[in-house]
Image: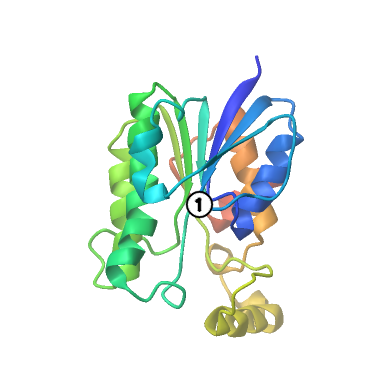
Amino acid sequence: MSKTAIILGATGLTGSILLEYLLEDSFFNKVKVFSRNSVGKTHPKLEEHLLDLFELQTVSDQFIGDVVFCCIGTTKAKTPNKETYRKIDYGIPVSGAKLAKQNGMNTFIVISALGANPKSRVFYNRVKGEMERDVLRQEIKHSYVLQPSLIGGNRNEKRMGERMAQVFMNFFGFLVPKKYKMIHPEAIAKAMQILARKGFSATRITSEKIIEIAAQ
């Protein structure tokens, strides 16, 4: 049976790659995108819903499908205001999970980050940890939290810290444990696609496992 996928964050680096994969995947006959900006393409399977994602609850009657892929995320540099950062990295994924639960969907896959911990003294790690905790509290049957390390790839915005870390990884990656190695967005997107089809034995999935899943 063909399924309907929902993507939150389809205009971002990983989300845009995931969108391409799902549009070519016969497992899905419809891909719904909820975002502030258009993905800038047309496809027979694509259905766009443009809105302020802080108001996701207002489109609950359209937020209906089988699998939710949440690729939402920002950075300290891009969103320096902590309140806004929390509304994005915590508020949108948790709202999406609540709607998925409310509308009877049984698969929710979200990108978090390595180091996420609701008790962390580091604000950004704590927000990710609180997001994970409250997404999983919805008790959606098939819930998967991906915890990648540094994500490689080309972004439109400048991220000097990430650029320096990527250079380090390119030269000295052999010294870094697998869990902390740089991971490419294509691997994350492919793993999400496969998780929707096959599932996995663990709920939280770190970089080395993401790469293993993507290689299937």
| Residue visible at 64% across and 27% down in the picture | 30
Left or right placement of residue 161 versus residue 182 in this view: left
Q: Mark 1 — residue?
A: 36
Element type at marker 1? loop
Left or right placement of residue 44 versus residue 147 in this view: right
Does any portion of residue 58 appear in the rendered image? yes
| Residue visible at 44% across and 25% down in the picture | 106
| Residue visible at 28% across and 44% down in the picture | 134
Quarter holding residue 186: bottom right
The image shows residue 3 at horizontal and vertical percentages of 61, 22
Left or right placement of residue 180 versus residue 18 in this view: left
| Residue visible at 56% across and 53% down in the picture | 37
Q: Nearer the viewer, residue 158 or 178?
A: 158
The image shows residue 201 at horizontal and vertical percentages of 49, 35
Quarter holding residue 196: top right
Q: Is residue 131 above or below residue 68?
A: below
Does any portion of residue 216 appear in the rendered image? no
Circle 1 packing at 10 Å, graded few (<14), some (14-19), many (20+), is some
> How many marks do you count on the picture?
1
Quarter holding residue 129: bottom left
Identified by mark 1, the residue type is Arg
- Seen as rendered, the residue at the extreme top is 1
Q: Nearer the viewer, residue 145 or 36?
A: 36
The image shows residue 194 at horizontal and vertical percentages of 64, 36
